[in-house]
């Protein structure tokens, strides 16, 4: 895709958590009007409609690759689109945005842990230091510089749903290394979106059968369109491209930017002022990302994947 080719992977991975942070704000704000399965289904339905005109020529070209790799595509679509998003929106019905951001910040740790357990991969020592420094920055922001705030943190059912959602996203990110070689990014995203939304369809129908329906207004419709375009199509294209070029462990660390963007958006939109712990936290996060990405070593299979399917 020309847009992703002209941008560095670091910029792509920086824009992605910003777009996702906006999605969490919308998801929490609309949870009383749009039930979680409906939110997931219509978000991706609109994303498919936006993406289809651009991606369909590549789908036709890549059809032999798609058929030959249908099993891995089914897994990627069901995990990275269907299960991950459904659990996240479900969790937002029962927990706060603050808890959600804290739990999102554990994605890099989950990616490293899953890679270590199942793939026997490890971070270089300085990369591990980068993860620790960045995580410390997250806690500095979310605790507002107070240890008691962290000690008072507790899990509820919504938090558990979000933890499961983050685990699904971590697995999806690691599994991107097995994305079919030679498959264009646009056709890949359209295929996994269709698969994922197919998995959500029966959940949405069941939700309606239980009496939970969407409250349609022009504002809600516009919000869903914005989430579909920015937090679904563009964010997933940016993320997939960044993971392809830098690897899952380095890319995962950029999730720590979500609380940074949350602080900046609160200042810009709500007029909240920066406190000293905000500056300290942001500095630690950026230092941690620099350490991990600076000393991260590209794997040969990532380099090979970056050379295909990018026209």
Image (cartoon, rainbow, N blue to C red):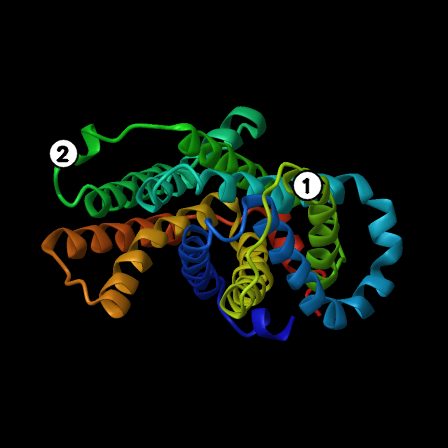
| Crowding at mark 2 (Cα within 10 Å: few <14, some 14-19, many 20+) | few
Residue 94 in sight here? yes
- Disc number for residue 268: none
44 to 204, vertically: above or below? below
The answer to whether residue 74 is left or right of residue 136 is right
Q: Residue at x 82, y 70 (%)?
A: 57
Residue 173 in sight here? no
Percent coordinates x, y for residue 24 in the rendering? 43, 53
Q: Which mark is first along the chain, 1 or 2?
A: 1
Percent coordinates x, y for residue 253 in the rendering? 40, 47
Percent coordinates x, y for residue 282 in the rendering? 23, 55
* Extreme residue in the top direction: 117
Q: 86 or 237, which lies in front? A: 86
| Crowding at mark 1 (Cα within 10 Å: few <14, some 14-19, many 20+) | many
Q: 87 or 291, which lies in front? A: 87
235 to 50, vertically: above or below? above
Secondary structure beneath dot 1 equals: helix
Quarter occupied by residue 303:
bottom right
The answer to whether residue 90 is left or right of residue 66 is left
Secondary structure beneath dot 2 equals: helix
Number of numbered discs present? 2
Q: Residue at x 19, y 44 (%)?
A: 140
Q: 193 or 61, which lies in front? A: 193
Q: Residue at x 46, y 30 (%)?
A: 113
Q: 77 or 268, which lies in front? A: 268
Q: For mark 2, what is the residue? A: 147
Q: Residue at x 71, y 66 (%)?
A: 49
Instruction: Give how far apart the Cα atoms at labels 2 and 1 are.
Output: 39 Å
- Disc number for residue 78: 1
């Amino acid at each position: 895709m020309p847009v992703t080719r002209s941008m560095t992977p670091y910029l792509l991975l920086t824009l992605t958590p910003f777009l996702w942070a906006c999605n969490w704000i919308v998801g929490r704000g609309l949870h009383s009007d749009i039930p979680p399965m409906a939110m997931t289904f219509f978000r991706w339905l609109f994303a498919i409609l936006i993406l289809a005109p651009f991606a369909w020529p590549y789908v036709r070209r890549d059809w032999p690759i798609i058929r030959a790799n249908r099993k891995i595509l089914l897994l990627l679509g069901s995990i990275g689109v269907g299960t991950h998003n459904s659990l996240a929106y479900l969790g937002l019905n029962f927990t706060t945005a603050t808890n959600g951001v804290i739990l999102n910040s554990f994605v890099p740790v989950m990616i490293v842990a899953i890679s270590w357990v199942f793939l026997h991969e490890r971070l270089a020592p300085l990369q591990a230091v980068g993860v620790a420094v960045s995580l410390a920055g997250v806690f500095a922001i979310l605790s507002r510089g107070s240890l008691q705030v962290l000690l008072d943190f507790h899990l509820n059912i919504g938090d558990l749903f979000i933890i499961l959602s983050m685990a699904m996203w971590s697995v999806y990110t690691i599994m991107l290394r097995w994305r079919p070689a030679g498959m264009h990014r646009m056709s890949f995203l359209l295929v996994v979106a269709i698969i994922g939304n197919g998995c959500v369809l029966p959940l949405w129908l069941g939700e309606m059968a239980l009496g939970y329906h969407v409250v349609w207004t022009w504002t809600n419709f516009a919000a869903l369109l914005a989430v579909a375009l920015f937090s679904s199509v563009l964010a997933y294209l940016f993320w997939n491209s960044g993971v392809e070029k830098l690897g899952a462990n380095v890319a995962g660390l950029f999730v720590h930017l979500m609380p940074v963007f949350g602080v900046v958006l609160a200042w810009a939109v709500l007029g909240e002022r920066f406190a000293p712990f905000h500056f300290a936290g942001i500095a630690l996060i950026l230092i941690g990302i620099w350490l991990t990405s600076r000393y991260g070593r590209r794997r040969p299979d990532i380099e090979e994947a970056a050379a295909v399917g990018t026209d």
